[in-house]
Image (spheres, rainbow, N blue to C red):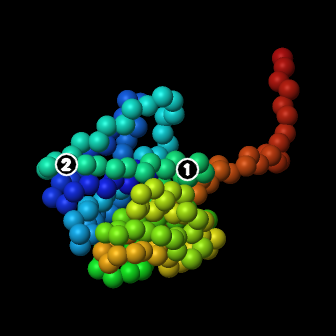
Amino acid sequence: IFPFDFPFGATVSSVTDTLGNTYAKIGSQLSTPGGDANQTWYAYNVTSGPDLVTVAFTGNVAYADSWPSEYTGIATVSPLDVQAGAAGSAGPANSGNATTTVANDLIWGFCIPDGACTAAGSGFTVRSLAGSALLEDLIQSSPGVTNATATITGSGWSMQMAAFKPFSAPPSPIAPTNLSIFFGGP
């Protein structure tokens, strides 16, 4: 999962890597009232190994930051369950609600403030608090309404939330029944 922070007016046009993994956008690009834009991309069922990720932008990009995060145990086919994102001018930061469809979704949240994100939302674990941005996650035990929140200083913020389905192991093999053996012969 790659959240990017960059100046308003630019957009992320593509994310590629040297291993040939496929990346997709999560939701819409968001912007804080102060002019920081953010967009999140993800790849799943990835090929692992030494890799170089390339991000292409359109527009004027004077800076760009990223906080990549990597998870195991995510579904290998259609992993994104739901997402939500919002921006506002007063805290706390809140992605808005989305309703998950399966148990044990990974709920991932990313906050970009005009001031600083200082604490994760209730139940979330902080995974990165670098500079002013915050990356958080939790496992939601039952499907239902969820959102990502964070405490901020300052007034403007944007908050992205994505729910990823857990890996579901293939069904266990079942021993056949009602077998008979035929010994053929002349």
Q: Is residue 154 left or right of residue 184?
A: left
Say whether disc 1 or disc 2 marks the residue closer to the N-terminus: 2
Labelled disc at residue 71? 1
73 up-or-down from 156: above or below: above
What residue appears at the point 52 percent right and 70 percent down from the top-left corner? 120
Specify the quadrant that holds the C terminus.
top right
Indicate the amino acid at tag 1. Tyr
Q: Which residue is mark 2?
A: 61
Q: Nearer the viewer, residue 184 or 83?
A: 83
Q: Is residue 115 left or right of residue 60?
A: right
Q: Nearer the viewer, residue 115 or 10?
A: 115
> In the picture, residue 78 is in which quadrant?
bottom left
Label 1 CA crowd tier, 10 Å (few <14, some 14–19, many 20+): few
Q: Give the SS element for disc 2.
A: loop
Residue 34, position as x, y percentages in the image = 23, 69
Labelled disc at residue 102? none
7 up-or-down from 70: above or below: below
43 up-or-down from 147: above or below: above
Residue 176, position as x, y percentages in the image = 79, 45
Q: Give the SS element for disc 1.
A: loop
Q: Nearer the viewer, mark 1 or mark 2?
A: 2
What residue appears at the point 26 percent right and 44 percent down from the top-left corner? 14
Indicate the amino acid at tag 2. Val
Residue 149, position as x, y percentages in the image = 46, 75
Label 2 CA crowd tier, 10 Å (few <14, some 14–19, many 20+): some
> In the picture, residue 82 is in which quadrant?
bottom left
